[in-house]
Amino acid sequence: MYKQLKVAVVQASPIHFNRKETVEKVSNLVNEASLQKPGLIVFPESFIPAYPRGLSFGTVVGSRSEKGKDIWELYYNNAVEIPGEEVRILEDLSKKSGAYISIGVTEKAGKSLYCTQLFISPLKGLAGIHRKIKPTAAERIIWAEGDASTLTTFRTPFGIVGTLICWENFMPLARMAMYSKGVSIYIAPTADTRDTWQTAIRHIAYEGKCFVISCNQFSRFEDYPQEIRDAEESYKQTGIISGGNSAVISPSGEYVAGPINGTEEILFADLDTSQVERGAFDLDVWGHYNRPDIFKFSLDGIPETIDC
């Protein structure tokens, strides 16, 4: 197993609600990141076609407006189908760059949408996906719930990689599912820019004795199409609505890189994965720091780790 890994964390703004142009921007960003030869490139939650921060989709309890349905239709029509053309483009980017790619999409499956993170291997293409198992608050009006079948982990040359999306990381048993699989590279795409999120990812890195890669998009309200800005009476503001705060945390809970805020930037970090084994000497919550004689943990339907 490789002991050194360079990661690229892409904090950028998608072309909001435009799948085709966002994929073109992803291509440019991967090509830019590849100049430094990272082994792993990470993009934010629902980057294609954008995390819809602040939008109401015309909803109040018991009612949905026609203007809100227009916004939903645009979002739905720009979501990503799996498999599909966008996935093939991402597979080609991974193969050409030689880097594994983790990227968030809004996935279209039938008539429902899911908040989904793709994991793409330069050797095997799309290795697997993770669908958010619990959308938070108003996210539930746009995204359906995933299940345990996509609590997926991946065996790579630099260790086992797993993903939980945004506030899934506040679910202790979801984290335990990742720890039970021996995750050493823990990807946490998010839409949360608060200081409390920084506290959480540092805790997770220390608790799991793993590297945590937190990636958020940077966006301004002006990035939304004009018809959305005109329709969203509840969210009339200008300027930055997501500053980012992307960061990489070590198994000791310390910053390796970042956080960066208020700008589009590719954050690079060099990881020494031997820190994972060294950290386990202190704490292994699935092993020597566990008490299975007292506490029982079970999970229905979790898949085996995928070789990729």
Image: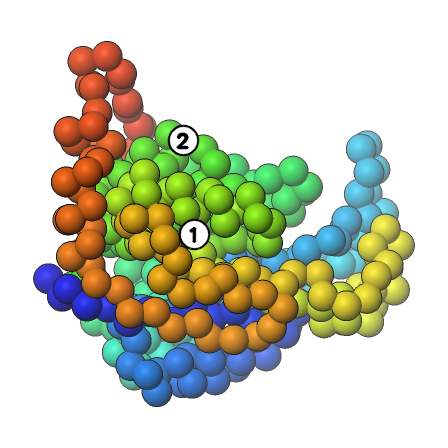
Report whether 203 appears left or right of 98: right
Colour pattern: rainbow
Q: Nearer the viewer, residue 76 or 164?
A: 164
* Residue 67 screen position, x and y as percent: 85, 55
- Residue at image coords 35%, 87%: 35
Residue lying furthest top? 294
Number of numbered discs on residues:
2
User: Which residue is label 1 attached to?
Assistant: 188
- Residue at image coords 18%, 13%: 293
Query: Secondary structure under badge 2?
Result: helix
Q: Is residue 156 visible?
A: no
User: Which residue is label 2 attached to?
Assistant: 172
- Residue at image coords 80%, 33%: 61
The quadrant holding residue 171 is top left
* Identity, as a three-letter code, of the amino acid under mark 1: Ala
In the figure, 231 relative to 23: above or below? above
Q: Nearer the viewer, residue 48 or 6?
A: 6
